[in-house]
Image (cartoon, rainbow, N blue to C red):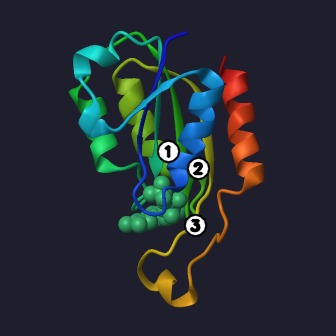
């Protein structure tokens, strides 16, 4: 199954670590939104969308890619790292957008990531060391279940 992962990870590269694990298991290509060519996306069978959660959503550049896509009949999976919010809340926006574009969502993965945003820096952040080995193993298990 030809798989593409589109990801954004700028805060502490937490999500990039998860994306690397998934990509290795699935033998998937990894790209950032600015590298994506819309017409190329359409040649993949399965597309993974992942980023940190910023203000309760995936990164705007990732969401914008979905807006640019035509309606398709394809499979997608979603992943993220986040500070503390629950997965159902963090994935709500991207899920809605993907469904509107005809994607069948075959899996979702999320774990906590080191977070020093805003006032959190004064307490040296939360989720130090996350994602950890356990999270990376869980990401690999998630990827194995997708294929
Ligand atoms: C600007 C900003 C906004 C954030 N907003 C949220 C949020 O609404 N909910 C949450 O749980 N975490 C939030 N976080 C924490 C990040 O989701 C978390 O640190 C994530 O692992 C960052 O991923 P990255 O290192 O791949 O960028 C925010 C972080 C930043 C920098």
Identify the residue at image location x=49%, y=44%.
91
Identify the residue at image location x=72%, y=23%.
145
Please rate how many residues cluster around mark 3, counting C-alpha atoms within 10 Å: few if below 14, some from 14 to 19, many from 20.
Answer: many
> Which residue was labeled with disc 3?
114
Identify the residue at image location x=50%, y=51%.
90
In front of the other: 107 or 114:
114
- Disc 3 + disc 1, Cβ < 8 Å: no
- Which callout, 3 or 2, points to the residue nearer the camera? 3
Q: Position of residue 51 (x, y in %)?
A: 45, 47
> Which residue was labeled with disc 1?
91
Please rate how many residues cluster around mark 2, counting C-alpha atoms within 10 Å: few if below 14, some from 14 to 19, many from 20.
Answer: some
Task: Indicate the secondary structure of the residue bearing disc 2.
Answer: helix
Task: Indicate the secondary structure of the residue bearing disc 1.
Answer: loop
Distance from the alpha carbon under mark 2 to that under mark 1: 6 Å
Please report whichever mark, 3 or 1, sits nearer to the chain's N-terminal start.
1
Q: How many marks?
A: 3
Image height check: is 101 above or below 111?
above
- Which callout, 3 or 1, points to the residue nearer the camera? 3
Please report whichever mark, 3 or 2, sits nearer to the chain's N-terminal start.
2
Residue farthest to the bottom, as pictured:
122
Quarter placement of the N terminus: top right
Q: Position of residue 76 (x, y in %)?
A: 49, 23
Image height check: is 24 above or below 60?
above
Image height check: is 79 above or below 28?
below
Task: Indicate the secondary structure of the residue bearing disc 3.
Answer: loop
Please rate how many residues cluster around mark 1, counting C-alpha atoms within 10 Å: few if below 14, some from 14 to 19, many from 20.
Answer: many
Residue 70 in sight: no
- Label annotation for residue 87: 2
Decide if ligand 1 comes within 8 Å of the CB at mark 3.
yes
Quarter placement of the C terminus: top right
């Amino acid at each position: 199954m030809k798989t593409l992962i589109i990801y954004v990870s700028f805060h502490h590269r937490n999500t990039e670590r998860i994306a690397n694990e998934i990509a290795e298991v699935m033998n998937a290509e990894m790209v950032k939104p600015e590298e994506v060519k819309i017409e190329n996306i359409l040649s993949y069978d399965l597309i993974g969308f992942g980023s940190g959660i910023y203000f309760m959503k995936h990164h705007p550049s990732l969401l914008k890619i979905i807006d640019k896509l035509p309606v398709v009949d394809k499979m997608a999976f979603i992943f993220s790292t986040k500070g503390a919010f629950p997965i159902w809340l963090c994935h709500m926006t991207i899920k809605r957008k993907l469904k509107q574009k005809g994607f069948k969502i075959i899996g979702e993965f999320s774990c906590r990531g080191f977070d020093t945003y805003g006032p959190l820096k004064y307490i040296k952040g939360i989720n130090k060391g996350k994602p950890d080995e356990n999270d990376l193993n869980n990401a690999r298990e998630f990827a194995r279940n997708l294929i």
